[in-house]
Amino acid sequence: MTWIGDNLGLIWEQLREHLYLAIVPVLLGLLIAVPLGYLATRYNWLANPLIAFGGVLYSLPSIALFIVLPVILGTQVLSPVNIVIALTIYTVSLLIRNVIDGLRSVPPDVRQAAIAVGFGSLRRVLTIDLPIAVPVIFAGLRVATVANISMVSVGAVIGIGGLGELFTQGFQKDFLTPVVVGVVLSLLLALLADLVLVVLQRVLTPWARVNSPVKAA
Amino acid sequence: MFEYLFDSFNWSGPEGIGARIIQHIWYTLAALGLSAVIALPVGLYIGHTRRGAFLAINLGNAARALPSLGLLMLAVLLTDQIGFLPVLIALVALGIPPILTSTYAGLSGVDAATVDAARGMGMTGREILTKVEIPIAMPLIISGLRGATLQIVSTATIAALVSLGGLGRYVVDGLKLRDFPQMFAGALLVALLAILLDLLFALAGRITVSPGLRRNA
């Protein structure tokens, strides 16, 4: 217990780095996956190759990506940039399917109504299609976030990565406390991030609450 | 970067690439087998009886957030052993959630009317499970096993951290020696192995899913 008190600064530092390394890729991934998914629903022939390509990317082991990326990109092997890029790739490959499914779940008459009222395609996508796709996109977002938080610690194998450093430290010193602290914090971080996404989804889809069976009864 | 892989000296002997691949496959299969032995029956039970679903699904999702590296270090320190046992514990904890949740999801997705029809024809609970529910749930069961395999095969790399073999050796040793071609070779081999296993599962899916189901898909 005294170890925790003595190392609060270090723990806080690793926690912040862990959060940063896991969340930035989720945001970047979302920014890339949404336009790609939109293109795939607009040009239908793109959808299947994109989903298949995403599947292949997702099957690449994270530790392998962390190491192979610097060779391809010319970055330093020990640079955190590799982790951010690798996890962004995972997020995109996971989200692309959800974005496509979500956009396809928009009822055609709703879309036609929007066009009939005079919505341009950009306005229609932003104010009609994407909000309706939110539940499906968020399902993927939640998986990606939790997966990223648990994958970041693997980076400690090659010497980068937030709470994972607590694992390797505790292991080298044959000392249980840092490992337990790291596991607990990483779990809490994942649960908290998931909770934030659930709340955000509720905020973004107020109509889901109005139509809920509880209210209707 | 490829010279390490193409040097025949690196391929032979008890520490050669051939032996490392076999070790890596052995860790993967052992962990996958044990995960399946635990998770499949539980998933089938929950899916068939609909008992304890809430608890199992939420535990399964929370377990996805467990950092496998931390789990490995924890298992080493708690069992006071360095070697196969802690690696197996960490990898099985990684393999159980995807198998459990998709087996349950597969079974609970079976149309209630189909189950009622089977019961009406005089099938017993066991017959309904083996002749109706499992075949219909097969695509999802396979995808759960596939997901578990991908995670296990990539994470088996960390076995090298507790002085076991497998392809992770190249990553861990290469990092210590600052021998990046060696790290690169290890990472590439893990990725190739993952893609190969993924293809095998795609094939297994084709063989085990009934033609009647494939037609509707």
Image: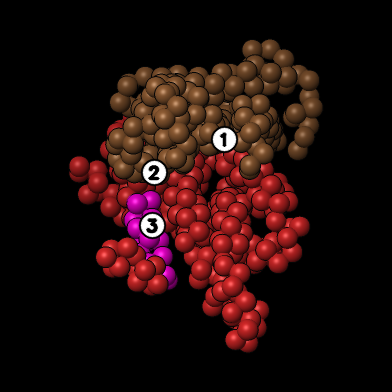
Q: Choose mark 2 or mark 1, whichever is in front.
A: 1
What tint does the image give chain B?
Answer: brown
- Quarter the C terminus of chain B occupies: top right
User: Which residue position holds label 2?
Assistant: B61
Q: Which residue lies most toward the front here?
A: B121
Type of residue at label 2?
Answer: Asn
* Residue span colored magenta: A190-205
Q: Where is residue A119 in the image (x, y as percent from the top left)?
A: 62, 84
Task: Name the residue: 34% across, 65% down.
Answer: A212
Location of mark 3 (residue) = A193
CB under 8 Å between discs 3 and 1: no
Chain painted in red in the figure: A
Q: Does residue B105 appear in this view?
A: no
Q: Specify the principal SS of the magenta part.
A: helix
Q: Mark 1 points at which residue?
A: B139
In percent of the image, x 60 and y 54: which residue is there?
Answer: A97
